Amino acid sequence: MFTVIRSKEAVLQALASTVNRDPTASDYRFQDDPYLTPKTSSEFKLFSLSQESGRNAAKYFISTYPKYFQKDYAQPHIPCLMPETLEAQIEEVSEAALIERIQMRKVKAAVDLYDQLQQAGTPVSLDVTNQLLDLICFYGDCDPAQENVPEQRNEETEDVQDEPQTKKGRASKASDKLKAAWKENNNAERIFALLSEPNTHSYSALIRGMVKYGAYSKAFSTYTDLLNNQLKADVSTFNALITAAPEVKEKYNEKWELIVDLLKQMAEQKVKPNLLTLNAVLKALRRCGTVGKSQAFPVISEMRALSIDPSLASYNHLLSIFYKPGAPFQGQTDILQEVMNEVSGKSFTPQDPDDAQFFITAVRICLDTKDIEQAYRVHELLGVGENWRLLGNDFQQNIYHARFFSLLCMMENIDVVLKWYRDLVPSVYYPSSNVMRDLLQALDTDNRLDLIPQIWKDLKQLGHGNRQTLVEELLTLMAREKQNQEVQETFAECALDIKKMYDTGDRGKVMMSWTAGSLSDLVSVLLAAQRRQDAWEILKLFKTHNRVPSEELLDKFLTCIKESGDVNQALELVQISAGFCLPGTPKLIQRVQQEFLLSEQQKSMLSDLEIQTFNSD
Amino acid sequence: MYRRLLININQVRNRLIHTHNTRLTLPSTKCKERESFAPVASTSLSEDKGKTPEETEVNAEVNTDGQRNTEMNEGTEISNATLTSQLETEPVVKPEDRKQVEKTKSGKESLLELLGAMKVEVTTVRKIRPSKTPRMSERPDQEPMESTHSMFQRATAEGSQQHGTLNPELVAAVSAAASTLPNRHQAESELLKQLRKHEAIPDTQRRADIGHIISDMKVGKRPNGRSNVRPTSQIRFDDDGKGYTQDRGITSELDGVRRRKSPFTSKRLNLFAAAAEQDALSDLGPTLWDIDLANQIVQATNQMPRNGFEEMIQWTKEGRLWQYPINNEAGLEEEASVPFHEHVFLEKHLDESFPQQGPVRHFMELVITGLAKNHHLTVQQKKEHIDWFRDYFRQKEDVLKEAEAYLN
């Protein structure tokens, strides 16, 4: 009887909600080809970028040669698969042609056409002129760069990309921030001056453009102009001006007074603020020092009273106001708690580009304040609804997980840490070597060194097998204490595996070099596992790598030899020691003489050695 | 007053079963407890018991629903407290005991069973809806429980002179119950003492009361009171053996203080009038700035699909995928407004310019029959098809006339 009209995605959404994350699987985008499942973070970057760049390359060819891609197989027609028209279709000088150029975002062509129209005396309607102003102000009177900015913006390994695209993408990015500035008397100002009766929209376009391209004081004078013309500003103008407010004043309270002044004028002109106003004010308050701390909450209350609910960006600004990175925390820990009380269990939709900063900021504060409980709440919030989308791109995800996991390593007992480790690594997170060191420390504090061989396997897979400091730390941990027999056995296997890592140095990767410390750790591990023969091999490496073993190590070795009663090896050990001219050699000789049953020949050899060392002293 | 007691008893019986079950699985490691970010209200009862008071406190402070957590705490207290009362009145409830005590009245047994079943419902109601009334002293209807309590005293006074022998099954039940408590021996002996005292209540009195209970059973459904009631003189035990549990009031009170102080409820700037109406500005659809904002948001957030369905959603949004639910008329929205007879009855297009009879007419009739059955073409295309023939025959009119095929 009654059919419920659902969106066309409803069925799929219902199905998608039944799928949970599989901690043993890699990211969905890599599941097509198991061979390309990334195991390290660099592989992850490379694979995801190459997928994206492949897409961009295809798009580039379709856009460049549209005539080869005209066949429309699909029925019903699929617009997004067809090449976009990049050339203007209307050649004549008319308003329609101007509109077309505005829609195609061709700034220069649109301005030229406008001038032609003006010269021909053809009137252009105010709406179209305003659109033109929007276009010019938005791009700062420059033609926009071609729009195929890669999906991944955290690129260090972007060299796989097409050369021309990368350059364009990069250049536009940099110029947006640095080079492009509002030029005096540019086309926007010129066209604006030509308008006989500019309206709110015209002013709005101009002011926003000025704020976007750094002409802050000019924006304010244009605003005064607007007021003089008996016009009202719109909400986006105010938002832009609030963003600009901290730039034009020096002192904290002056900045704040200017913002309050703008808000009052909004109220006078009956302009209803929106979420972006709230976020702009809070963002400006980040630069108002102590004023920010006192005024942030009243601002939020004010907006609440106008039924504007803060988004995650608002909370992000709030946290940034109260927790400056690197600054000491004076009893502000409960601000985070208050914020978490507010947001817990809520599902947020993206409303502001800054929304994606919240999780990173929150987890940073948790890490700084060592507040594991709040960190759990932050992580829990991430699982609510579509909030995971707000974690941002891969780079931000990585930062988030690194901070979260470091905090876990610091605060939690090892079982919990390992549970999270199994959950996060490597399906969503590829830990860096620093984080792995944190994990090793956590293992150490909780006395679960027996897990080291397991961690070593992961380390190798994560591509940290050739991080010298990390590997040395691993060896030291294994060598430090005597474990039970079973564990020692696995340690020995692991140590030999590590030794292979030193030997091979595979495929152009940085070779690790043996140090005296790592060698003696290795020997100790092997000795503890009663692998005298392997240890003996390692002992020889001291010589080949020009490292000097310590006396304790040789002493330990001798004890081990004594257990098996191998006299010849004991003598060789003494000879090695003498070869290094160690000061402890006489003691070793003495021990051998006392503790072993020696033949005459061996006795004489020892006494020869004794004399030699005596003489060399 | 017995009614209330009975409710309590059933509640406790339920809880006891519950605690027993969870007790078995209780060796949940520290890790397990910590991973439960959101304490699940219904099951954390026994877990809370397993915790040290410090831990519970920490949890209560930290969790969003710390309120609820403290309630759970209290729930344990009650289960401890009412444990005694259950055992005191055991004969009334426990089926085996009932048989012995009330041999004569077997009819009441079924009634009691009915009663028990109903009361279980009552308790579940309470469990699902944890009460919001914070303190016992604030509640206006606190006297029922107090009267229950005074009833205890009266009952003990009555029965103190009789030292009847206890049913061995009862003793076993007592020791089982006591074993769930930390201070096992003390609890057991206490329970048994209470039990002995209570044995003495005469059967008749009970029966009368039961009849009374059944008559106004509905009153027992009080959804919000039970959890906050706490007998004042009852000793509350906790697992660490310190004897007394910490007063649950402290944490909840602190919580309350904190909540009141929340900076999010601070006073506003009072710059805007709440009902400020926005002047209706000319809306020309999304401007370039709006599109850019949307674009920035998309760029800032993670739009990568996490599974096949999400990818399909993306494709659907881009228009690349056939929409679900599958509709074989997708993309034919324009055709939907064309009635079928336009497709099928095409004779009207033949009227004007074609001969009324003869081979051309015959041919065209065949053409429109074919077209009428063709579902690949739109009506417009069919018309064009016919128009093509019209032009063709007009061009060949001379030839056709010569062949006497064109009759008009």
Image: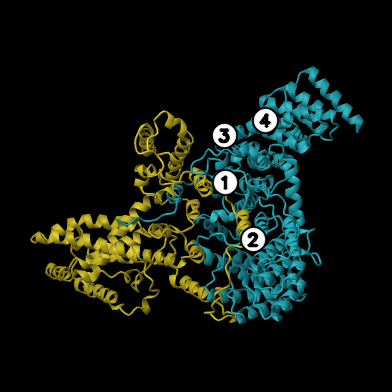
Chain of the residue under the numbered disc 1 shown in the image: A
- Which chain is in yellow here? B
Q: Nearer the viewer, mark 4 or mark 2?
A: 2
The picture places residue A227, in percent across and down from the top left corner, at 69, 80
Q: Colour of chain A?
A: cyan
Q: What's the amino acid at mark 2? A: Leu
Circle 1 Cα neighbour tier, 10 Å, few/some/many (<14 / 14–19 / ≥20)? few
Chain of the residue under the numbered disc 2 shown in the image: B
Q: Residue furthest left?
A: B104
Circle 4 Cα neighbour tier, 10 Å, few/some/many (<14 / 14–19 / ≥20)? some
The picture places residue B145, in percent across and down from the top left corner, at 29, 74
Residue labelled with disc 1: A80
Q: What's the amino acid at mark 1? A: Cys
SS state under label 2: helix
Q: Is label 4 in contact with label 3 (beta carbons under 8 Å)? A: no
The reply, left or right, for residue A153 in relation to residue B376 is: right
The picture places residue B47, in percent across and down from the top left corner, at 42, 57
Q: CA distance from mark 4 to mark 3?
A: 33 Å
Q: Earlier in the sequence, mark 4 or mark 3?
A: 3
